[in-house]
């Protein structure tokens, strides 16, 4: 049986329309809220049609020296209907961190599977 990790796909988001882009500062102050945004298709737009769409995204934080990642956000992009009612795959939240670590984002395309990306963040 395969591990779920074997299904994760990755790449450079500038050349692959399925890779989640993590918009967050490289460093933040401990305990201060900052905006965290994930998106798909920043450089190459992803189709958002009834046949081909990004269904959801999840964001986790793995603290340096930690044991397990912590879920920060879940975004569902449910509006992919007829008549141009389409959700752009963008999720925005505000978070606070106390320690440095890595933000991990995964997104799911109904045709091409699960995609991942990560970004290191330093807490001062």
Image (tube, grey):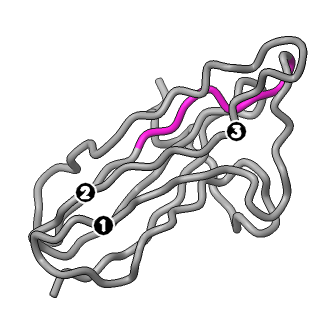
The image shows residue 44, relative to residue 89, as above or below, that is: below
In depth, the one of 89 and 59 nearer the eye is 89
Q: Gap in Å between the C-alphas at discs 1 and 2?
A: 6 Å
What segment is highlighted magenta in the picture? 51-58
- Left or right position of 78 against 30: right
Q: CA distance from mark 3 to mark 1?
A: 22 Å
Count of numbered badges drawn on the protein: 3
Quarter of the image with the C terminus in it: bottom left
The question of residue 57 being in magenta is answered with yes
**Residue ID for mark 2:** 95
Name the residue located 81 percent from the left edge and 44 percent from the top edge. 46
Name the residue at the right extreme.
83
Q: Earlier in the sequence, mark 3 or mark 2?
A: 3
Res. 2 mark? none
Front residue of this view, candidates 22 and 63? 22
Q: Earlier in the sequence, mark 3 or mark 1?
A: 1
Q: Residue 116: x percent and y percent? A: 54, 51
Residue for point 32% across, 76% down: 121
Residue that carries the numbered disc 1 in the rendered image:
34
Decide: marks 1, 2 in contact (CB < 8 A)?
A: yes
């Amino acid at each position: 049986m395969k591990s779920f990790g074997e299904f994760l796909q990755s790449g450079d988001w500038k050349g692959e329309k399925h890779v989640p882009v993590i918009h967050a500062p490289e460093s933040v102050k401990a305990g201060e809220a900052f905006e965290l945004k994930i998106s798909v298709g920043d450089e190459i737009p992803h189709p958002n049609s009834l046949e081909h769409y990004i269904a959801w995204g999840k964001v986790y934080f793995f603290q340096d020296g930690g044991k397990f990642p912590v879920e920060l956000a879940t975004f569902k992009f449910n509006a992919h209907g007829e008549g141009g009612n389409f959700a752009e795959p963008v999720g925005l939240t505000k978070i606070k961190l106390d320690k440095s670590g890595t933000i991990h984002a995964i997104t799911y395309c109904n045709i091409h599977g699960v995609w991942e990306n990560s970004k290191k963040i330093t807490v001062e």
